[in-house]
Image: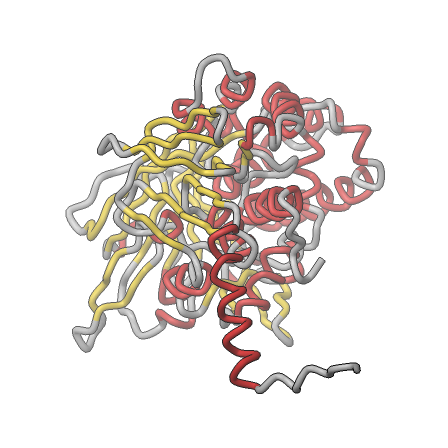
């Protein structure tokens, strides 16, 4: 006699799934991510469905939004201003753009046209953007047109970009050259380099002129010729807080918890916090800055010495209401430049960002040359810088990925200019190594 099992009810099926999911949840491997910049946040978001993810951050807020400040508007309501402003452009940021689209971040176009003035206040270059279909078309407004120096600088810029575009048809040629060597080889005008190119690169890379000149030439040229001048600059319309909220869903977030050491062992990795608490994880992703990650690792690990070869630059940024910091009123971004000196760069929040058009006079200045009594907030930052030597060290570090269950994630790891896109790209690579592919890849 043959017996047939009765059909299982929907309630029974639900109970079965529930009973099966509980042990599966308990068996999910654990991952600790140290650092909650965009690299750590992206890695956490990608891994959250396959791993039990714990994200550690030393600041009281996630790292990507740790330096935001409330600025009162005309109605007295607070406006959250991100420091720095966290802008990007699709020409160089395909993964960043795809990530924001995937998680539903609303994007707003910004205007980052610039006016360059020298130490005496004389105009060097003034260009503006005409937005057509969301794409900027650069032109010289009347102050730029009537300045002989501005016209000359515009012509030199056009010549430089044409030459750089041709040279990047074979980027390997310049992979072993510094930017300084490239500029000398191509006999680029020293005046254009000192007063336009280097100030712009100092802001992009958050470094000094000397550090910008020591970058690998192909990385800088790759950025400048990627279409960033054509695609326009955008940002999250709701600011960094919205991005953080979306990327931390399904993740255990432990802010105000500094990690002091990460040690590989027989049963995984031991992570010790500043309070002396010890925890075990199957995998650990080091997503803090290179020098911070190095300090957490045992001296015997080769990765520690490699991380220590990544240089970094310190800088200061202020949020203020000082109108005199804007030599060319109405220009979204004002550069004060001088040969051999790190530029002062001021973003007029009302003219640059649609979200802040209602604010009367609020500015964000990087590397202020003079102090001001009208400062609302002041922040100090460190950012990685790239040299030919550190580039080689990071190539060797990428070969260390997964050894002892340790992974290295951050803008400095990717073979790119260390911007937000590099950080996101490094997170995608780490996630892929852990068996999780980005949904847009």
Residue 253 lies, with reference to residue 211, above or below; the image says below
Q: How far across and how far down the image is residue 161, in percent? A: 72, 45
Picture quarter with the N terminus: bottom right
- Left/right placement of residue 168 relative to residue 141 reads right
Residue 206 lies, with reference to residue 179, above or below; the image says below
- Left/right placement of residue 401 relative to residue 298 reads right
**389 or 414: nearer the viewer:** 414
Quadrant of the rendered image containing residue 352: bottom left
Quadrant of the rendered image containing residue 139: bottom right
Q: How far across and how far down the image is residue 170, in percent? A: 84, 36
Q: How many marks?
A: 0
Q: Is residue 144 visible?
A: no
Residue shown at the point (30%, 38%) measured from the top left: 380
Picture quarter with the C terminus: bottom right
**47 or 35: nearer the viewer:** 47
Residue shown at the point (58%, 61%) measured from the top left: 99
Q: How far across and how far down the image is residue 359, in percent? A: 29, 70
Residue 221 lies, with reference to residue 393, above or below; the image says below
């Amino acid at each position: 006699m043959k017996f047939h099992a009765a059909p299982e009810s929907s309630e029974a099926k639900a109970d079965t799934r529930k009973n099966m999911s509980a042990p599966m949840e308990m068996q999910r491997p654990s991952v600790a991510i140290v650092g909650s910049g965009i690299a750590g946040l992206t890695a956490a978001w990608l891994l959250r469905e396959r791993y039990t993810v714990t994200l550690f951050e030393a600041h009281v807020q996630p790292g990507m939004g740790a330096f935001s400040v409330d600025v009162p508007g005309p109605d007295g309501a607070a406006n959250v201003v991100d420091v720095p402003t966290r802008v990007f452009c699709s020409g160089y940021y395909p993964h960043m753009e795809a990530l924001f689209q995937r998680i539903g971040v609303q994007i707003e176009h910004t205007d980052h046209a610039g006016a360059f003035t020298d130490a005496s206040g004389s105009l060097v270059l003034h260009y503006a953007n005409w937005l057509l279909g969301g794409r900027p078309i650069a032109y010289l407004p009347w102050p730029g047109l009537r300045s002989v120096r501005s016209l000359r600088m515009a012509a030199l810029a056009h010549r430089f970009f044409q030459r750089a575009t041709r040279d990047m048809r074979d980027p390997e040629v310049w992979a072993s050259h510094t930017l300084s060597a490239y500029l000398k080889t191509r006999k680029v005008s020293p005046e254009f380099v000192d007063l336009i190119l280097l100030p712009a690169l100092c802001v992009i890379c958050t470094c000094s002129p000397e550090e910008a000149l020591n970058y690998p030439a192909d990385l800088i040229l790759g950025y400048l010729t990627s279409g960033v001048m054509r695609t326009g600059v955008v940002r999250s319309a709701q600011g960094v807080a919205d991005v953080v909220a979306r990327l931390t869903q399904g993740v255990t977030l432990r802010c105000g918890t500094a990690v002091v050491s990460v040690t590989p062992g027989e049963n995984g990795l031991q992570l010790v916090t500043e309070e002396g608490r010890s925890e075990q994880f199957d995998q650990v992703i080091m997503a803090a800055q290179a020098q911070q990650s190095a300090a957490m690792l045992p001296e015997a690990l080769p990765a520690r010495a490699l991380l220590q070869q990544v240089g970094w630059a310190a800088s200061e940024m202020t949020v203020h209401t000082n109108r005199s910091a804007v030599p060319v009123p109405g220009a979204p971004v004002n550069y004060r430049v001088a040969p051999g000196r790190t530029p002062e760069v001021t973003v007029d929040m009302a003219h640059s960002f649609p979200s802040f058009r209602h604010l009367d006079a609020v500015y964000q200045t990087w590397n202020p040359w003079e102090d001001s009594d009208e400062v609302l907030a002041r922040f100090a930052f460190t950012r990685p810088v790239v040299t030919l030597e550190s580039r080689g060290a990071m190539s060797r570090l990428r070969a260390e990925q997964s050894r002892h269950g340790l992974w290295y994630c951050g803008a400095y790891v990717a073979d790119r200019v260390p911007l937000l896109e590099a950080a996101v790209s490094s997170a995608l690579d780490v996630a892929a190594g852990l068996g999780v592919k980005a949904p847009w890849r």
